[in-house]
Amino acid sequence: MSNPASEPFIAIACGGTGGHLFPGIAVAGVLRDKGCQVMLLVSEKSVDQQSLKAADGLEVTTLSAVALQEGQARNAISASWDSFRMLSRMFRKRKPNAVLAMGGFTSAAPILAGKLAGATTFLHEANSIPGRANRWLSPFVDQVFISFSMAALRLRNRSVMLTGMPVRPQFPETEPGAACRIALSLRPDDPVLLITGGSQGATSVNSLVCEALPLFKEAMPSLQFIHLTGTEDVEKVRRAYKSNDLRAAVFPFLTEMELALGAATVAVTRAGASSLAEMAAMHLPAILIPYPWAADDHQYFNARSFADSGAARLMPQRNLTAKALAVAVLELIHNADAREAARRALDKWFFPNAATDIANKIFRSIDRNSGIVDEQSKLSLNPR
């Protein structure tokens, strides 16, 4: 029987959006399987609390954190300071062996408190253009992991490792097709268009698709829809499908994203790094509409990387019409060769061992720095 006092303790800061939380959960699962105690550090935002349904019994601590946006600087600094003081007290009583931050506004306080406590510190940068928090923190951490090779040029750290983006194991384990459609109350044999704006939805994308519904109805009456709207637009979108007499599964948010991706023939989505990684894991062809106000326009550059490799089609939101979107979707649904070419190109972007590679690096650092990892645990370092 294991002794909790001898088990490595790792804190993972992964709050703010599902795009930070779900990859953090994936790494946490691997570390827990290696015998580590793992604590997730998340924000108070509702999207974090909803997403924690996928945390599978992991220990969770909620931080006071506010995104550093225009007009929010004072609140963001105050919240980060409160989180830093709370974590410093916590880490004095229960020292972490390592702290991993998955990016975003919940990263700074855990990394700084972890450094103060003597922990080995790690960052994961999900996007092609690193976020402000990670750019600021990167010189202070022991190791940086990245999903896009171009991100290394903007991070001031001598130890940068390309791992790709971790995804939860249920994505590569899910068989796409009829079973996923049936699970979402859709017809098993008709094509499905998935629309998602990420964990928080996308009002502009929702409006474009709703405007295009009559065109879809006229051109392909058998087309079905899975639409993840975010909390603001769910009722409006449901009414739009009902008024056009189209079969649709509409949700504000879906924890079981593997079902949605497995059911879909084609997706229309934003270009957040986590969403792209999940589509790559499921080899789902997509039309990407990057969020045009993302920091440093990083979603555009994420999408550009996928589109340049043939893994997706990029359609910037500026001047995009419902008709142009409908034409692009229908062309891709009708063109099996184009979808197959996109699936082959997506192989480049699927890193099946990302969570394991990150966990192994953290685990080895604990072994090297603290010596508390036993011989049996060392045997589990090699990826399967």
Image (cartoon, rainbow, N blue to C red):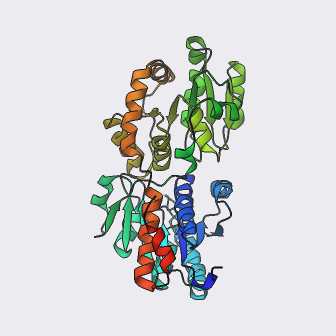
The residue most toward the top is 218
Tell me if residue 129 comes above or below residue 253 in the rendering.
below
The x and y percentages for residue 336 are: 44, 21
Residue at the spot 56% in from the left edge and 83% down from the top edge? 88
Viewer can see residue 223: yes
Q: In which quadrant will I find the N terminus?
A: bottom right
Front one among 3 and 60? 3
Residue at the spot 66% in from the left edge and 37% down from the top edge? 233
Front one among 353 and 233? 353
The x and y percentages for residue 226 are: 62, 32
How many numbered marks appear? 0
Residue at the spot 57% in from the left edge and 32% down from the top edge? 194
Q: Quadrant of residue 143?
A: bottom left
Tell me if residue 227 comes above or below residue 113 in the rendering.
above
Viewer can see residue 314: no
Report the side of 164 relative to 50 (left or right).
left
Front one among 219 and 325? 219
The x and y percentages for residue 307 are: 35, 36
The x and y percentages for residue 149 are: 31, 54
Residue at the spot 37% in from the left edge and 40% down from the top edge? 306
